[in-house]
Amino acid sequence: MKYVLVTGGVVSGLGKGVTASSVGVVLKACGLRVTSIKIDPYLNTDAGTMSPFEHGEVFVLDDGGEVDLDLGNYERFLDVRLTRDNNITTGKIYQSVLEKERKGDYLGKTVQVVPHITDAIKDWIESVSAIPVDGKVGPADVCVIELGGTVGDIESMPFIEALRQLFFSTGPDNFCLIHVSLVPVLGVVGEQKTKPTQHSVRELRALGLTPHFLACRSAQPLLENTKQKLSQFCHVSAANILNIHDVPNIWHVPLLLRNQNAHEAILKQLALLRVAIPPNLQEWTNRAETFDNLTSSVKIAMVGKYVGLTDSYLSVVKALLHACIACLLKPSIEWIAASDLEDESAKLTPEVHTKAWETLRNAACVLIPGGFGDRGVKGMILAAKYARENKVPYLGICLGMQISVIEISRSVLGWKGANSTEFDEHAPNPVVIFMPEGSRTHMGSTMRLGSRRTLLQSSDCITAKLYHNPEYVDERHRHRYEVNPEVVEHLEKTGLRFVGKDESGQRMEILELASHPFYVGVQFHPEYKSRPGKPSALFLGLILAATGQLEAYVKTHQNGSI
Ligand code: GLN
């Protein structure tokens, strides 16, 4: 196995994840098979319990792993399916070491950070990098490892030490270290400053790791003399100083690396030049340029709870982007805090309330993404009602589907007490209920997580047509509550159709409203499997419907062609 380690210095938020995935893209374009590992030095065992407000969205994998959103970047960029073990956290490592200690596996020895924690990290990396993630057999050629955080952080020390040892044991031909850093421009003189990079490289070297490459983030392209200075003071040859300056969209980053011949230098470092082919990045070039030249856009109202931090819905945003670009449109996402639509907000903050409704009414479609807890639920119900009554294209994801069911039960069936037991345990009409897959009394985790099968009930529905008429779809889930099977019959009398169910027929997976141009609710999260060149069927449907192209699309593609 050959490793490319990507570390970061100076400040966080430099786009280390995008840099690392772009390196992967370029290597893949050279004909190599690539996998990736993200190391998060925090103590949480996984991202499942972390607030999207603070940490951005929780990304969900096929195997049900709740992981850092950077893994989503890798899946989208490299078009791979990662496993939960591809995300290493301090919590997971300590948990595995402590379990072994309790079992007595250390034979009475003192258990220490070095060597026990560091050995566990190395073993984990070695075994996970061998798991194929691209659907082929056998391990990949290269594993890109991204070390989260900034070099010098106390919590990343054991990882740095383990990686240093890994480097030493695999040998120089099998290891390539890329250090991502910042070259800021200061003040009136406008000089590109190399000092922060010098300091962070010094810090890295003090820990025993010498970078082979610098990937310098900057606003403008690096000047020649800045490169020379960096080379001299950081002990990295000028040819290995890569520059990732600001670009109009992230799909340019692999192209930027290719244009600087980064692939050749990396392949040389890994002794892979002979097996690689010249990189083919035509698809990336087309996409990056197409996007830059788009002139029309489509307004999408996103009615959610965490609208302050757009990373909270990163995969939804990306899926909208993929769908829009397939329709040659730029997404114009209008964020609406669900609570601003509520009647209480009309009293307390009338201007905010008016503005929120204005934004909703001006949008071409409405999307209610997933979420937990009852904040903003009233506002979401109002948004779903607005979309239903005014025939505005609507996509409800997970919580968004449950909201539809509550809304229709209240407004159409007249069940005033309709609610989810998540929001009111004693709801008079529990239309959305807790339906654990395992035992109800079982103490452990009760979330329905990861890939589950949905059987399409009929080929005569919009969803089936958009997915090109398969018997089933496998999409990723992350929820506890579901439509109460006992009320399905009543709901279907209102014109609601449950066109997708699980294999038992008890779990409602997809709903559609017959008398509406596009009103779809899904219990799963289609956003997680959307890819730049392969937009998710339902997101595509939403955008097509919003721009009046759905019918024509369905007609042209009814034979299953793309
Ligand atoms: N809170 C809801 C549930 O647990 C919806 C979850 C979600 O939208 N991801 O079922």
Image (cartoon, rainbow, N blue to C red):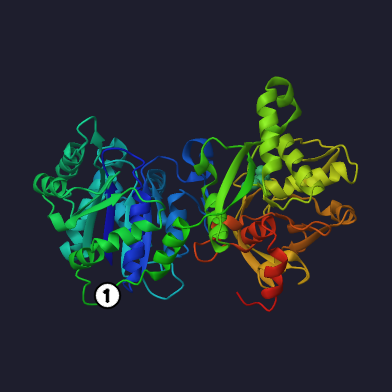
Query: In the figure, residue 454 lies in which quadrant?
Result: bottom right
Q: Secondary structure at mark 1?
A: loop
Q: Residue 171 location in percent, x, y?
A: 17, 63
- Front residue (pair 50, 379): 379
Which residue matches tag 1?
276
From the image, which quarter does the C terminus lie in? bottom right
**336 sits to left or right of 221:** right
Q: Position of residue 304 (x, y in %)?
A: 63, 40
Q: Is residue 470 left or right of residue 129?
A: right
Residue 322 located left or right of residue 409: left
Residue depicted at x 51% and y 51%: 59
Q: Position of residue 270 (x, y in %)?
A: 21, 66
Mark 1 vs ligand 1: CB below 8 Å: no
Q: Is residue 555 visible?
A: yes
Q: Is residue 431 visible?
A: no
Q: Residue furthest top?
A: 348
**Residue 240 image offset from top left, x and y in percent:** 18, 57
Instruction: Give the residue type at disc 1.
Output: Ala
Q: Identify the image quadrant of the N terminus.
A: bottom left
**Residue furthest front as drawn:** 295
Q: Number of numbered discs present? A: 1
Q: Answer few, some or many: residues within 10 Å of disc 1's Cα (few below 14, many 20 plus, some between 14 and 19).
A: some
- Answer above or below: position of 210 versus 283: above
Establish if 343 lies above or below 118: above
